[in-house]
Every structure is written in C-alpha cells, then in structure tokens.
Image (spheres, coloured by chain):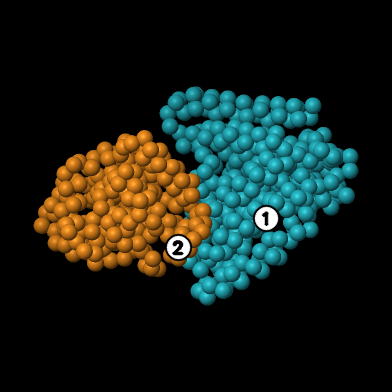
Chain colours: A cyan, B orange
Amino acid sequence: MHTALLAGGILAVLVLASAVGWGLKRWLARGEPHAVIDNLNARVKAWWLMTAVIGLALLAGKGGVIILFAFASFTALREYATLMPTRRADHWVLVLCFFVFIPFQYILIWVEWYGLYSILIPVYAFLAMPVVAAVRGDMRNFMQRAATLQWGLMLAVYCISHVPALLMLDIPGYAGRNAFLLVFLILVVQSSDVLQYVWGKLAGRIKIAPQVSPSKTLEGFAGGVASATLLGASLWWVTPFSFLQAAAVSLMITLAGFLGGLVMSAIKRDLGVKDWGTMIEGHGGMLDRLDSVCFSAPLFFHAVRYGWSQ
Amino acid sequence: MSLAADLFAGVITGFTRLVTGAQARWIGCGPAAVQRIYFANHASHADFALIWASLPPDLRCRTRPVAGADYWDKGRVRRYIIHEVLRGVLIERAGTVRTRDPIEVIVEALELGDSLIVFPEGTRNLSDEPLLPLKSGLYRVACQRPDVELVPVWMQNLGRVLPKGEIIPVPLLCSINFGVPMRLAAGEAKDAFLGRVRQALLELGASVRPQ
C-alpha cells in the first residue's frame, strides 16, 4: 500500500513536470530552441530514466541496490580521477581504488559487516594509498596527489555507499521496510535540489555564494530547503520517524545537501570545469547529480543508526 | 569486409568505447565524407581503435590507419586485425629493412580515394612531453597530394589509462578531439609546415584540457 502510494506520487510529479516542460516549449518557446527550457526538458527526461533505474534496482532487492550504487561510485570516481592531475606513479593507487576498494566496500554492505565497512576507507585505504604511491618513488607534489585521491575515494565511494548501507540497519518494528528509508533520503535530497533550482529560477535575486556558484541564490536556497523539508515531513508515514522527527531529519539532510553542492562547486571552480561529466543529459555527470547525496547520506545513515536502530 | 571481420570490428569499437568512455568532439570540422588525413598524437596501443571507433560507420569503412609493418605483420592475430578488420596501410618504418618507400605506399592508398589515419610522431609517446618531434612524412605526402584535407586529432588521457609498462588499465574517461582542417600552403617550406602542424596539435590539446 505504501509502495503504491509513493510510486504513484512520484509518477504523478514526473508526469506533471513533463507536462509543464512540454507546455513551456510549446507556448513560451513556441517550438524554437531555448537554452533554459530545453535544459529543463532534458533534465525531466533524465529524471524519468533515473527513477526507472532506481525503481528496477529496488524491485531486484538488496543485490540490485548494491550493484546500482557500486556502479554509481565507479562512475563518480571515474569522473573525479579523470579531472585530477594524477601522475604515472599514481597508477597503482588508482588500480587499488577502482578494482579493490570499490568492490570491497560494497561486499561489506552485502555481508552486513558494519565494523569493517565504516573504517575500510578512512583507515585502511587512507593508510595504504600513500604507501603504494611512495613505493613508486615519485615525490613530486606528493602530499597533494595523495590527499586528492583520498578525498575522491571518500566522496565517490565512502559517502555514496551510505545510501545502500541503509539496508543494513536493524530498526525495531521496521523490519523489511528499510528500502523506504533509501527512497526517503533520495527523494528529499533530490527534490531539494530540484526545488532550489525552481525557486531560484522563479524568485532568485540575491546571490548566496557568488564566487563559488553564481547560480545559487538565497531565495532558491530558502525556498528549496523549506519546501523539501515540508515534503520530507509529509512522508513521515513511510519512515520510522514521527512527523516532527521527519521534518528535523529532512531539514538536516537538505542543509547537508546544499553544503555538499557548494563544496563540489568549489572543487569544480578550482579545476576550471562546469560539470563533472556528460553522462546524464541536462544534469552533467554522475557526480553533478550525486554531489548533495555525498554529504547527506552519511549524516542520514548515522542519525538513523544512532536514534532508531538497535 | 567479411562478416567475421565486421563482427570483430564491432567488438573492438565497442570495447574501446566501454573502457575509455570516449566521446568524439568535432570541434573544428564535422564528420564529412571528404578525403582526409587524420593526424593524431600517439600515446597508446588503443589509439587506432579509438579514432576508428569515433568515426561514423560510413566514414569508418573508408578510413584506413597507416601502421608500422614491423609491429603489425608479426603473428596471426595482429595480421588479421590490421589487414582484414582495420584495412591498414602498412609501411616499413625507419630503422627496418625497406623494400618500398613508405611515402609511395601512402600516396598510392590515397589514390584509391580512402581517408587515412597517421601518427606523425612515428612512435608512441611515452615521455612526459605532450608531443614528440614530428617526422617529415606528413610534409612529403602533402607535397604530392596538397588537395587532401589534413585534420589534427588530439586524444586526451589515453596515455593515462594505460601508462608505459603497466598491465591493468584504469577506467579514466578519454576524449578524442577533431580540430580545424589544414592544408600545405603553396611554396611552404618543410620546417614551417611541420611547425604549423605541431602547433595545431598542441593548441588543440591545450584547448580541451580544463584550465
């Protein structure tokens, strides 16, 4: 019943978004090319695809979800490492990240070994990576190279892996329903991104971080965070939270998501690129879509784990 | 092309696309069906496959890579790939025993109307420099066929995917960039022309690097 209601709601929003996009293209742009409207329509189309992929993964169960997010981590790390100025001596570090730490991290979720899962990357990987680089004997920009790849592994693998890790949590009276937590997190964080975009386009005036991200406005931020928090609160019935708890948790993850987007924009600005990649039409790369999730997923996971799980 | 070779070609292009995630960016020209020589930087064994995979199918079957006979004529698999699949034009490189002038072989291939892919560095660039000194072959071919368009092609990151001496490739995203077509100017000297060619490649490379 909950599943049908939630799926129906999401579908209704997507249909509405497509209808609005179609209407804008028809009457505002009169069928002519229009940068903003065309981008909006590309985004909506990509949302249909992403919703379908996530839906299929959820239907396939734990394995499907783990594989989907392992793939997301792989793609995100790929985009990250491509843009970073690594040297030949970093080759084995990259091999280790892509082919050892990504599979290992997600296998730990599958076998539900929380203890090792939570320290594999911040302890073992972070110690091993500079060792492998040092053995190769190229000391040029050593600190910078080591830290750059560690931070990439942190964002693309460690942080993103906290989404499927929600399936590991053992919450009294909520057995078998953890997938709703995952949907709740993605829905609230992503709709916060979308609503910030919509509020910013409709009412945005005051730039909130002109140096880092000129498209972010105070109005977009406030409107987006407030409306996404409201949305999250109104979804309390699929979560183990009360209405007020759901609102507080939503506020926390939307704020974290906003800050995540800000940090990722700062990195992109430093590198001199607009997007991380080109994989998702209208959105940019995988990391462009997941930047807010990177920051909100670990906070959400630990809040739920501390407050609600056994 | 036989069915088996066709299938093999599909496997090569598909695999290269998958590993490199490569996008073709037609910056200075479109994928037009005119006779061209694509000249590119050379950092990896996968370079041929990548350029080839980036061309639309109708151009691909009319574009032949120019390759070193000393490498490609060794072993049955390589021979099959270069002759049956890629339809390569094999030349005898400097330092090997030559029975025919490579320029003659290349010009002969152009007479058949096909486009060619060449690597004017002559060998894979395994140094830290962006580009090795260019060989003079491109100039000599251009002297004989000044009508053929010369298109600079810059491949980004392919050398990082599989650096010298490594066995396991890392899946970094690559790009392949096609620049503005150029031609040999009337009366242009060899050094001036090669300098211009080199500059075109380096500028294309610099323009696609995020800065």
Q: Chain of mark 2?
A: B
Q: Nearer the viewer, residue B16 or B182?
A: B16
What residue lies at 48% left-to-right and 46% top-to-bottom?
B18
Q: Nearer the viewer, residue A277 or A24?
A: A277
Residue annotated with mark 2: B163
Residue A212, picture quadrant: bottom right
Q: Name the kind of residue labelled 2 in the image.
A: Pro
Residue A254 visible, this angle: no
Could you confirm whether marks 1 and 2 are on the same chain? no
Q: Residue at coordinates 45% horizontally, 63% vertically from top-left?
A: B163
SS at mark 2 in the image: loop
Q: For mark 1, what is the residue?
A: A104
Q: Amino acid at mark 1?
A: Phe
At 37% from the left edge and 50% from the top edge, which residue is drawn?
B77
The image position of residue A224, as x and y in percent, is 67, 41
- Residue A136 rendering spot, x and y as whole percentages: 53, 72
Q: What whole-number distance in Å separates the C-alpha atoms at marks 1 and 2?
A: 25 Å
Q: Answer whether residue A112 is visible to the viewer in this image.
A: yes
Residues tagged 1 and 2 counted as in contact (Cβ below 8 A): no
Density class for disc 2 (Cα within 10 Å; few <14, some 14-19, many ≥20) is many
Label 1 CA crowd tier, 10 Å (few <14, some 14–19, many 20+): some
Horizontal arrangement in the rendering, residue A271 relative to residue B186 (left or right): right
The chain to which mark 1 is attached is A
Left or right? Give the position of A89 relative to B178.
right
Q: How many marks?
A: 2
A297 and B43: which is toward the camera: B43
Q: In the image, is A174 to the left or to the right of A254?
A: right
